[in-house]
Image (cartoon, rainbow, N blue to C red):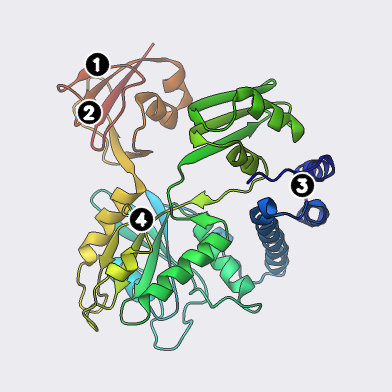
């Protein structure tokens, strides 16, 4: 159901977008919230605004802590390796044991609850690349006291490239999984692949430009342009992918959308109990891998890294200079489906600007050294030689 915001509400939303300081954003959002018409179609929007207000207040509190030299997470969690993967779960499910077993990290491992109070990181090696694993502090049951603790943990997940949801199979595993997913959903994070995507690049165009790759289900391009104008947007590029409704586009304009994170589920402690995981699978989609593991006897841990690699949907591309035999030892990491042009941009803007053609060796080539253009789609393990003008 659409939000059907009136002119007063939209004007207050425009004011929020113009504010820069968190304190001013909070005042503007509270003003906007009070002006939202109260009907069923606005329930998700009201929840989203409450979440934004909560996050802004936590952001202000964290800034105060950092300014007083208190501990903060930010700077110590700079991304390294091919991807940053955050390990989430309840207390005492084996997150520290997993990190210690798979990486060179040495987290404190104890029987008492909430041993880990700060994020701990280590590098998981996989073939010729590494994944930065971060053990986040355990999620607490939802209550007033746990709100700030959980928000900091979920903020780490929000900035990651992917997630490991860790479950103790010997306990109430279905409850644990549902609880983690609920925590993520409340924070605006989803592990369910979206059927559509709307990206709004403000001030990147003259007027409203719309790039549609898919289908508008209940509207046309004129309706989308009219909606953008009603929110005071005059210059923007709207990229719309998949089958999309006008409500979806309005939610994107209102920043009322969830962030998708690739995830795998690890059901730990199979050494303690032989339990079927079919009940867990009922709560997840088929594309979310579920591995039964044991950190105690190392059962199935060798499958964690390749499963992460596959789930992230990334490819490794090697480069070589024209006329030379050796290739680079360290690959470029790209999203699956990336083109030669995308790699050229990744290497340097000059390679993209002056691109002439490329030669490919590997899975995507019809024969070794095939000459291809910039739109050629790369595959994992390709070696590429770029020629410029």
**Location of mark 4 (residue):** 285
Q: Tell me if residue 77 comes above or below residue 324 in the rendering.
A: below
Side (left or right) of 143 relative to 8: left
Q: Can residue 92 be seen at all in this image of the molecule?
A: yes
Which comes sooner in the sequence, label 3 or label 4?
A: 3
| Residue 311 horizontal/vertical position (percent) | 33, 50
Q: Position of residue 21 (x, y in %)?
A: 78, 51
For discs 1 and 4, the disc positioned in front in the rendered view: 4
What crowding class fits label 2: few (fewer than 14 Cα within 10 Å), some (14-19), or many (20 or more)? some
Where residue 334 sits in the image (x, y, percent)? Answer: 37, 38
Residue corresponding to mark 3: 20
Q: CA distance from mark 3 to mark 2?
A: 46 Å
In this view, the mark in front (2 or 1): 2
Q: Earlier in the sequence, mark 1 or mark 4?
A: 4
Residue drawn 24% across the image and 16% down it: 371
Q: Left of 266 or right of it: where is 41?
A: right
Q: Residue at left 83%, top 54%?
A: 31
Give 10 or 337, whichever is nearer the viewer. Answer: 10
Crowdedness near tag 3: few (<14), some (14–19) or many (≥20) residues, C-alpha within 10 Å: few
Residues at discs 3 and 1 in contact (Cβ within 8 Å): no
- Residue at image mark 2: 364
């Amino acid at each position: 159901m659409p939000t059907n915001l009136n002119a007063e509400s939209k004007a207050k939303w425009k004011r929020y977008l113009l504010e820069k300081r968190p304190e001013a954003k909070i005042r503007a959002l509270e003003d906007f919230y009070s002006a939202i018409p109260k009907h069923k179609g606005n329930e998700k929007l009201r929840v989203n605004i409450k979440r934004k207000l909560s996050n802004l207040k936590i952001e202000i509190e964290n800034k105060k802590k950092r300014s007083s030299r208190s501990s903060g997470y930010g700077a110590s969690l700079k991304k390294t390796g091919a991807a940053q993967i955050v390990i989430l779960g309840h207390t005492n499910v084996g997150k520290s044991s997993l990190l210690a077993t798979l990486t060179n990290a040495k987290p404190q491992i104890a029987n008492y609850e909430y041993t880990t109070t700060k994020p701990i990181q280590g590098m998981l090696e996989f073939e010729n690349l590494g994944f930065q694993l971060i053990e986040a502090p355990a999620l607490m049951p939802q209550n007033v006291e746990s709100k700030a603790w959980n928000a900091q943990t979920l903020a780490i997940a929000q900035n990651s490239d992917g997630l490991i949801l860790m479950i103790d199979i010997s306990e109430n595993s279905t409850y644990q999984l549902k609880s983690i997913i609920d925590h993520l959903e409340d924070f605006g994070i989803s592990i369910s692949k979206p059927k559509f995507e709307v990206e709004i690049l403000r001030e990147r165009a003259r007027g409203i430009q719309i790039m549609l790759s898919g289908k508008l289900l209940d509207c046309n391009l004129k309706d989308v342009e009219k909606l953008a104008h009603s929110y005071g947007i005059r210059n923007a590029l709207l990229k719309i992918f998949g089958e999309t409704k006008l409500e979806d586009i309005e939610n994107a304009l209102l920043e009322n959308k969830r962030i998708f994170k690739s995830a795998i589920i690890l059901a730990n402690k199979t050494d303690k109990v032989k339990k079927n995981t079919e009940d867990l699978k009922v709560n997840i989609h088929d594309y979310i891998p579920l591995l039964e593991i044991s950190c105690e006897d190392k059962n199935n841990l060798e499958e964690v890294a390749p499963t992460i690699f596959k789930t992230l949907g990334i490819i490794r591309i090697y480069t070589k200079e024209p006329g030379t035999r050796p290739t680079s030892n360290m690959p470029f990491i790209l999203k699956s489906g990336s083109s030669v042009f995308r790699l050229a941009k990744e290497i340097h803007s000059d390679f993209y600007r002056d691109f002439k053609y490329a030669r490919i060796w590997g899975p995507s080539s019809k024969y070794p050294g095939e000459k291809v253009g910039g739109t050629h789609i790369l595959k994992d393990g390709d070696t590429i030689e770029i020629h410029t003008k």
